[in-house]
Image (cartoon, grey):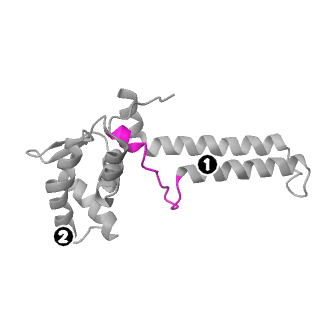
């Protein structure tokens, strides 16, 4: 059973995501509410690419030109963004949801949220099981307390992830 209708064919989504600049543009647009000036988007992408803040002017100009001439028109044509060439502004559209399913969100630590949650789950299971088996040091604490602690970590992590990704969540609720 499919809950969301994929509006773009998978090969097209993979083609969109095959370009690092387009991926970064979608990430940046997803982290901002509403419309974003192309210049601001180009500056953010240039900083991500160069690792320098502010990015060198040559890099910013290169990113701006490629966004304006190639990437944003392509994303607009596919219904992923709404790109106003005259106003030089861009905003995510409903079509971005079908692409977003294929983008794995990486945490500040360099691993994905999925890896993080799996790690917390496995560690919680092992520690709780060790407490039930009364393994020294771990068995001193009630297994219910361990399980509650790991569930609290899950809840706090989910709240943090939702907060940092709040614009996409709100956009999804509106759509």
Which quarter of the picture shows residue 35? top left
Mark identifier at residue 117: 1
State left or right for residue 122 relative to residue 12: right
Which quarter of the picture shows residue 149? top right
Magenta span: helix, strand or loop, mainly? loop
Q: Which x, y percent locates residue 47?
A: 30, 65
| Camera-nearest residue between 65 and 169 | 65
State left or right for residue 162 relative to residue 49: right
Mark identifier at residue 139: none
Q: What range of the chain is rendered magenta?
A: 96-112
Where 12 falls versus 94 (above or below)?
below
* Crowd class of label 2 (few under 14; some 14 to 19; many from 20; radius 10 Å): few
| Camera-nearest residue between 97 and 36 | 97
Q: Check disc 2 and report the residue beneath it.
A: 57
Q: Which x, y percent locates residue 120?
A: 66, 50
Query: Which residue does the image show at 21% across and 53% down from the upper left?
Result: 71
Marks 1 and 2 sit apart, C-alpha to C-alpha, by 39 Å
Q: Nearer the viewer, mark 1 or mark 2?
A: 1
């Amino acid at each position: 059973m499919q809950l969301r209708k994929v509006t773009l064919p998978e090969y097209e989504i993979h083609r969109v995501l095959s370009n690092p600049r387009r991926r970064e543009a979608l990430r940046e647009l997803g982290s901002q509410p509403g419309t974003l000036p192309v210049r601001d988007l180009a500056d953010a992408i240039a900083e991500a690419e160069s690792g320098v803040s502010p990015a060198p002017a040559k890099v910013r100009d290169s990113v701006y030109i490629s966004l304006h001439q190639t990437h944003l028109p392509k994303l607009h044509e596919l219904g992923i963004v709404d790109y106003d060439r005259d106003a030089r502004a861009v905003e995510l559209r409903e079509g971005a949801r079908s692409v977003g399913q294929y983008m794995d969100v990486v945490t500040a630590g360099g691993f994905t949220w999925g890896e993080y949650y799996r790690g917390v789950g496995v560690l919680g299971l092992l520690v709780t099981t060790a407490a039930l088996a009364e393994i020294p040091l771990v068995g001193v604490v009630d297994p219910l307390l361990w399980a509650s602690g790991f569930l609290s970590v899950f809840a706090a992590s989910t709240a943090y992830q939702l907060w940092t990704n709040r614009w996409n969540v709100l956009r999804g609720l509106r759509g």
